[in-house]
Image (spheres, rainbow, N blue to C red):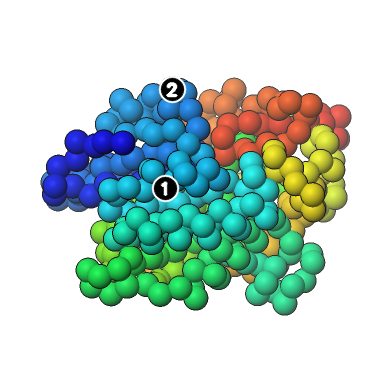
Amino acid sequence: MSSNIASNEKLILVIGATGAQGLAVIDRLLAPADDGSPSPYTVRALTRDPKGRRARELTAKGVECVPGSFDDFSAVAAALKGVYGAWVNTDGFTVGEMKEVWTGIRIFELAQQAGLKHYVYSALEYSFGFSGWDPKYVCAHVDAKGRVADWMKSQPSATGDKGMTWSMVYTGPYMDMLYEAMFGPVKRRPDGTVVFASPMDRGHVPMIALADIGFWARYTFDNRETLSGESLKVASEWVNWNDVINAYTKVTGQKAEFIPLSVDQWFKMWANMDRPFATEAQEGDISWKENFSGWWNVYRDELWKRDLDWLRKVNPKSYTLEKWMRENNYGKDEDRLFRRQLSVNGVLKHTADGLYPLAKDEFVAQL
């Protein structure tokens, strides 16, 4: 593997490069600095298919796309050669909970062996653990990253130029998921009212715009020594669904309504929820229904906390819900707002990759 990287440029390996988060991170890493000077970073992307559409779009931006998946450790080791740092976002929806924990640990070890300067793990909070192992908060794709993050905290993070520093960025549900049936509207009434429905009868979701994840990724690499061994818990806004209705009405001028559902009622909108949540299912993997029951319970009971005053002090251009809706012309594109595309067999898939399987219109019609 070769690279024509100038000596003053810092090569960052992005794992999860062609996912929604990875694309936002890469855009920010390549962007000029605030003073207009060129970015000090170049990007190498690990991708299963370097000839795929998203990989080709990255190549056009000057990204070096190399073949491999994050659970192929020989490919990961090769991709880590010669890089300054890495942004690592593994995909539990593909490999399952147990394998995601192991890959998270092993990639960190490979980065140490490769002599990286800075390693950034895209984490989620170990809700099951810090709740006292309350089963109502079990959520496989969250807990796997939380376990890896807890393990990383026991590992040394270097100071100065000797050894590898690491940071963790704890993200949350994407604000951009408001374009999906997961968070977004489920129907429009004959009188034009747009209807949102979710189990959020209480609590808040720490939503983050994908562009803001890009900001925090760049921030961690720009401040490597200051953030050595640090965990950043980030968000754009602390959101309940009354906030969604208010922002939607203000931005679009359209009528909107929120219908609070129980978790069990919410699952009536989806098909085949008893299947294992991971594409490459393993023995012991929980179902989609079990996984997302815990996910909603975390937000309804507000287990995750965020210091929005500090976050906006560091990132004064951070999105609010209203700002995000205005910038994205939210509500203007009817086709995009009400996508109900079924995935294979009507199974809920990883929504951030563009699948919108609102599968049971007969229930939605009753709302």
Query: What is the total number of numbered labels drawn onto the structure image?
Result: 2
Query: Considering the image in quadrants, where does the C terminus appear?
Result: top right
The residue identified by callout 2 is 51
Q: Residues within 10 Å of mark 1 (few under 14, many from 20)?
A: some
- The type of residue carrying mark 2 is Lys
Q: Quadrant of residue 342?
A: top right
Q: Circle 1 sits in a helix, a strand or a loop, which is it?
A: helix
The N terminus lies in which quarter of the figure?
top left
Question: x and y percent of residue 28 in the render?
Answer: 32, 45
Q: Is residue 315 visible?
A: no
**Type of the residue with mark 1:** Ala
The quarter of the picture where residue 299 lies is: bottom right
In the drawing, does residue 259 fall left or right of residue 306?
right
Q: Residue at x 38, y 38 (%)?
A: 45
Q: Residue at x 13, y 47 (%)?
A: 7
- Name the residue tied to disc 1: 77
Residue depicted at 62% across the width and 38% down the height:
351
Earlier in the chain: of badge 1 and badge 2, it is 2
The image position of residue 267, as x and y in percent, is 81, 44
